[in-house]
Image (tube, rainbow, N blue to C red):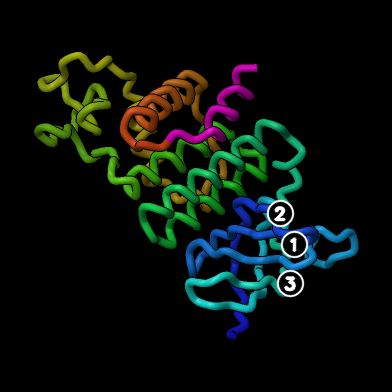
Amino acid sequence: MEIISIEGIVVNSLKYGESSKILHILTKDKGMLSVIAKGALKEKSKLRVVSSNFTYAVFHLYYKEDKMCTLISADVINYFINIKSDIEKLGAMTYLTDLARNVYKQHNDEAIYDILINALLKIEEGFNIVVLTNIVEIKYLSFLGVGLYLSGCIECNNPNVVSISYSKGGYICALHRKNEPLYDDKVLKMIKAYYYVDISKITKLEISNNVIETINKFLSIYYKEYTGLYLKSKNFLDNIKSS
C-alpha cells in the first residue's frame, strides 16, 4: 500500500460504524477520492477536525487506486473561518463544492478543482459571493457540454452582439435576434469577462448591482434548463439570499 500526500478539499462526509467517517475528497491530482478516517468521531482523535466538511488541506493517505483510501493525517491549508461564520458564504461554499463534485462526474479535469479552490479563497477574502459563484458557473458550463459561445454572434460570428440566447447557447447580433431580450452592453461584456478571468488574480470587483443581478438571473435559468443538474444546495443558497 502506497503512502501519498495530496492537496484536496472534503466535499462531504458520512458516519461509518460507531466512530469512523467516510470522506469524499476532491483532489487536484487524483480527482475524487473515497477515504476512511478511522476513529474520527472520537473526541480525542487527531482526525476529528481535519475530517469535517470543507477541510482544505494536504492529506496524507494510505492510497489504493480505485479503492478506499485511509487517512493518516492532514495539514490544513485554510480553515475558511470567514466563510464558516457567515450563513450566506457557507451556503455558497456548500453549493460550489456540490457543483464541482457533480461536474467532475461528467468530466475529469484538474481545472475543475483549481476553479473551485480559487473561488473559495476569494470568497474567504471577502469578495462578492454572487459574482464568484457566477464565475464558477460560467467556467463549469464547458465541462458540462453546454458552454456559451462568446466569440461573437453564434449564428454569424458578428462581434457586435445585442443579446444572449438560452436556446442557442451564445451571443446573438441584432440581425439574428428573435425573441431574445436586449441586454445592456456592460452585461454582455461582463459575461465574457467572467469566463476568461483568472480567479486567482482578482484584486477588485467593481460591478454594478444591476449587472450582477442580470447575469445571476440568466445563469440560474440556463443551469435549470440546460445542464440537467438540480442541486438542493442551490435551492438552499437561493433561499438564503431571498430571506
Marks 1 and 3, how far apart in space? Answer: 14 Å
Q: Tag 1's secondary structure?
A: strand
Marks 1 and 2, how far apart in space? Answer: 6 Å
The numbered mark, 1 or 3, whose residue comes first in the sequence reads 1
Quick one: which residue is furthest to the bottom in this view? 1
Given the image, on which type of amino acid does mark 3 rest? Ser
Task: Give percent across and percent down for residue 177.
Answer: 16, 19
Task: Give percent across and percent down for residue 78.
Answer: 70, 57
Residue 15, which numbered label? 2
- Residue at the spot of label 1: 20
x 57%, y 70%: residue: 68
Residue 73, which numbered label? 3
Q: Nearer the viewer, residue 235 or 22?
A: 22
Callout 1 touching callout 2 (CB < 8 Å): yes
Q: Tag 2's secondary structure?
A: strand
Q: Is residue 237 magenta?
A: yes
Q: Tag 3's secondary structure?
A: strand
